[in-house]
Amino acid sequence: MPKSATTIHDVIEQLDEIIDNAVQQNSRLGFFAVLYRTVTVKVKEGIAAGRFENGERMERLDVIFANRYLEAYEQFRSGATPTSSWLKAFESAKSWRPLILQHLLLGINAHINLDLGIAAAMTAPGSALPGLKRDFVEINKILGELLDTVQQKIGSLSSLLGLLDKVGGRTDETVFEFSMEMARDGAWRFAEKFAALTPEQHPAAIADRDEKIVKLARRIINPGWLLRLAALVIRLFESGNVFKIIRTLS
C-alpha cells in the first residue's frame, strides 16, 4: 500500500497513478479520480495565489482529505473493505449501466458527505474549527467555479443527458448543485459535531455517518423507475470509451 500523501504534490502524483492505471485497465474508477485531480490542482493554485486565509493549514486539510479517498481506493483494490459509501462508488465502476454523471456523483457523495467533515475536524480540532470556516467556504467557491466546465465536458460525452431535465423536472446542473452545495453544508455541520468528540468516539461517529451516506449512494444509483429508464436510454448513446472520457474530463 502506498504511503500516505504528505503534500499536495504527493496527492497529485498518487491521483496520476490511479488515472494511469484506470486507462491501462479500462476502468471507470478513473472518472472520479480525474475530476478530483482537477479540483486538487485548483486548490494548489489557490494556495500559491494567497487565496486562502492560511495556506499551510489549507494544504494540511487538502492532504488529510485526499488521504481518506486514497486509502479507501487502496483498500478496495487490495480486497479490503473501505467505508460503505466508498464501496458503493467503487463497485459501480464494474458495471456498464451507470452514467458518467452517476459515477462522479457517487464519488462526490462519499468524499464530501463523509470525508470532508472528518478532514475539517482533524485539521482544526475542537475550538479551532470555527477559524477554518472562511477557507472552507473558499473551497466551495473553487468547486462552484468548476461546475459549468464539468457539465459541458459531460455533455460532450453524453448527447442525450438533457433527458434528465425533461423526465426529472431538473437539469443536470441542479443535480450537481444539490450534491455539491448541500453536501458541503452538511459536511460542515458534521465537522462541528465531529470536532467535539473524543478520539475514542470517532469510529462510531464515522460508522453512523457512513450508514446515512450510503443510502444517498443507493438513490444516486437507483433514482426511481422513470429516471432509471431515462438513464438507460442516455447510457445507450453515451460514450463508453474510458480513455476518451478520462481525457475529456481532464
Image (cartoon, rainbow, N blue to C red):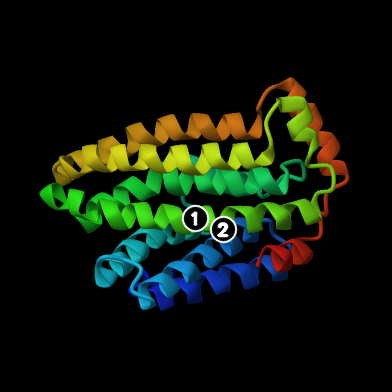
What residue occupies the far right of the structure in this picture?
237
Between 93 and 64, the one lying in front of the other is 64
Residue 208 place in picture, x, y as percent? 33, 32
User: Where's residue 123, x and y in %?
Assistant: 24, 58
Query: Which mark is on residue 146?
Result: 2
Instruction: Work out whether 25 lies above or below 81.
Output: below
Q: Quadrant of residue 164?
A: top right
- Looking at the image, which residue is at 58% across and 49% down? 90
Residue closest to the eye, 143 or 230: 143
Is residue 71 visible in this depiction of the protein? yes
What residue is shown at x 14% (from left), y 53% (from top)? 128
Which quadrant: the C terminus? bottom right
Q: Is residue 41 left or right of residue 46?
A: right
Q: Mark 2, residues whose alpha carbon is within 10 Å: few (<14), some, or many (≥20)?
A: some
Q: Locate residue 180 relative to residue 137 in the image: left or right.
A: right
Residue drawn at x 55%, y 66% as measured from the top left: 38
- CB contact under 8 Å: marks 2 and 1: yes
Residue 207's place in the image compared with 125, above or below, is above
- Quarter of the picture containing the N terminus is bottom left
- Residue 143: assigned label: 1
Residue type for callout 2 = Leu
Residue type, mark 1 in image:
Leu
